[in-house]
Amino acid sequence: MREFYEKYNVNMLVYYEVHDNAEAAIKREQRLKFWLREWKLDLIYKFNPHWDDLYNKIAAFC
């Protein structure tokens, strides 16, 4: 099975959320799966209006 990023040609990180625990993150992910695409795009534009690649920003914390 191909990885998600290969299947969907993902090459940038444009949005992320930080949660206190895995359970909260999983619940949030499950809620977002049912959102309309437009709502998801609005969420990204509010968080990262220029669609900058945020990978290096969060990789520094690991």
Image: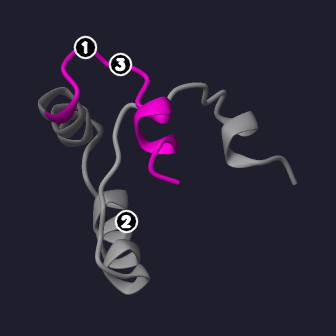
Q: Amino acid at mark 2?
A: Glu
Tell me residue 30's x, y (percent): 37, 70
Seen in the picture, residue 3 relative to 37 is either above or below; the reply is below
Tag 1 or tag 2, which sits nearer the N-term? 2
Tell me residue 53's x, y (percent): 43, 23
Kindly report which numbered mark, 2 or 1, lies closer to the viewer in this rendering: 1
Kindly report which numbered mark, 2 or 3, lies closer to the viewer in this rendering: 3
**45 or 55: which is nearer to us?**
55
| Label 2 Cα crowd, 10 Å radius (few <14 / some 14-19 / many 20+) | few
User: Which residue was labeled with disc 3?
Assistant: 52
Which quadrant: the N terminus?
bottom right
Asked whether, in this view, residue 20 is left or right of residue 6, the answer is: left
Q: Amino acid at mark 1?
A: His
**32 or 25: which is nearer to us?**
25
User: Which residue was labeled with disc 2?
Assistant: 29
| Label 1 Cα crowd, 10 Å radius (few <14 / some 14-19 / many 20+) | few
Q: Is residue 29 magenta?
A: no
Tell me residue 60's x, y (percent): 48, 42
**16 or 26: which is nearer to us?**
16
Report helix, strand or loop for mark 1: loop
Tell me residue 50's x, y (percent): 25, 14
Contact between marks 2 and 1 (CB within 8 A): the answer is no
The colour style of the image is one colour
Mark 2–mark 3 Cα distance, whole angstroms, equals 22 Å
User: Which residue was labeled with disc 1?
Assistant: 50
Asked whether, in this view, residue 52 is left or right of residue 1, the answer is: left
Contact between marks 1 and 3 (CB within 8 A): the answer is yes
Residue depicted at 25% across the width and 45% down the height: 36
